[in-house]
Image (cartoon, grey):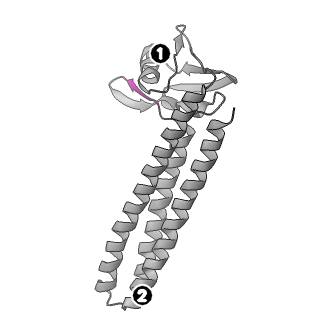
């Protein structure tokens, strides 16, 4: 820990907001744009021998063509569980199981589906910004406690609140920029 307890609290806030932003980025990776990408299945969970695990722990995912994903299970006995996991993930994909691999044709996006995906992206971005604002609220309370505990002046508190707002603005703006790019990519035909 450094000598400045207020800075420690602000550094912690920055880290927590960075995590919220990174989660948004990973959520956006699972929202598809025009072509097939293994990241589309990144958030798929599979029930495997009684426990729920990410798809990438039980299979490899490749995109040999722009309109096809291929899922190769590490254990052929898990192929049904993997297929079920993909179906329940609500990605609008229909996996074809041939007993060894799962082929997932990725149909071109209709205008209506593009709008749905853009809306989904906006919702996820809003959730991330809510999370960032909740972190700000928690950190503000933490700052008040820290200032009181260390008998620091009100000026220190006001300066820390300004710094906290700058950090918050940085991550909300990054979220907005990421949303804008993702929406543009989704709507691009």
Q: Quadrant of the N terminus?
A: bottom left
Q: Are marks 1 and 2 in contact (CB under 8 Å)?
A: no
Name which quarter of the figure residue 6 lies in. bottom left
Q: Which residue is drawn at 42% across and 87% down?
A: 156
Q: Which residue is drawn at 36% across and 90% down?
A: 152
Of 78 and 176, which appears nearest the observer?
176
Residue 74 in picture, x, y percent from top left: 52, 21
Q: Residue at x 65, y 40 (%)?
A: 185
Q: Which of marks 1 and 2 is nearer the N terminus?
A: 1
Q: Does the magenta stretch include residue 47?
A: yes
Say whether residue 139 is left or right of residue 39: left
Q: What is the magenta range?
A: 44-48
Give the distance between the C-alpha atoms of the residues marked 1 and 2, in whole angstroms. Answer: 59 Å
Instruction: Point out the residue furthest to the top here.
Output: 98
Q: Quadrant of the C terminus?
A: top right
Question: Which mark, residue 79?
Answer: 1
Say whether residue 132 is left or right of residue 185: left
Residue 8 in picture, x, y percent from top left: 44, 75
As displayed, is residue 86 above or below residue 174? above
Q: Residue at x 45, y 52 (%)?
A: 128
Circle 2 Cα neighbour tier, 10 Å, few/some/many (<14 / 14–19 / ≥20): few
Q: Magenta-highlighted stretch: main secondary structure?
A: strand
Q: Is residue 4 magenta?
A: no
Q: Tag 2, which secondary structure? A: helix
Name which quarter of the figure residue 115 lies in. top right
Residue 184 in picture, x, y percent from top left: 65, 43
* Residue 2 appears in the figure: no
Q: Tag 1, which secondary structure? A: helix
Which of pointers 1 and 2 indicates the residue nearer the eye? Answer: 2
Q: Mark 2 points at which residue?
A: 156
């Amino acid at each position: 820990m450094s000598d400045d307890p207020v800075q420690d609290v602000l550094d912690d806030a920055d880290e927590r907001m960075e995590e919220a932003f990174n989660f948004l980025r990973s959520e956006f990776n699972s929202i598809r744009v025009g072509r097939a990408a293994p990241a589309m299945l990144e958030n798929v969970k599979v029930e495997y021998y009684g426990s729920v695990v990410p798809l990438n722990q039980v299979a490899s995912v490749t995109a040999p063509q722009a309109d096809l994903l291929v899922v190769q299970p590490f254990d052929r006995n898990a192929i049904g569980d993997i297929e079920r996991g993909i179906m329940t993930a609500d990605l609008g994909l229909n996996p074809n199981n041939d007993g060894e691999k799962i082929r997932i044709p990725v149909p071109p996006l209709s205008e209506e589906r593009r709008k749905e995906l853009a809306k989904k992206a906006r919702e996820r971005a809003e959730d991330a910004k809510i999370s960032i604002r909740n972190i700000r609220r928690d950190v503000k309370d933490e700052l008040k406690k820290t200032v009181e505990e260390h008998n620091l002046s009100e000026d220190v508190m006001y300066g820390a609140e300004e710094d906290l707002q700058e950090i918050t603005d940085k991550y909300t703006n990054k979220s907005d920029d990421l949303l804008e790019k993702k929406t543009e990519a989704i709507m691009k035909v």
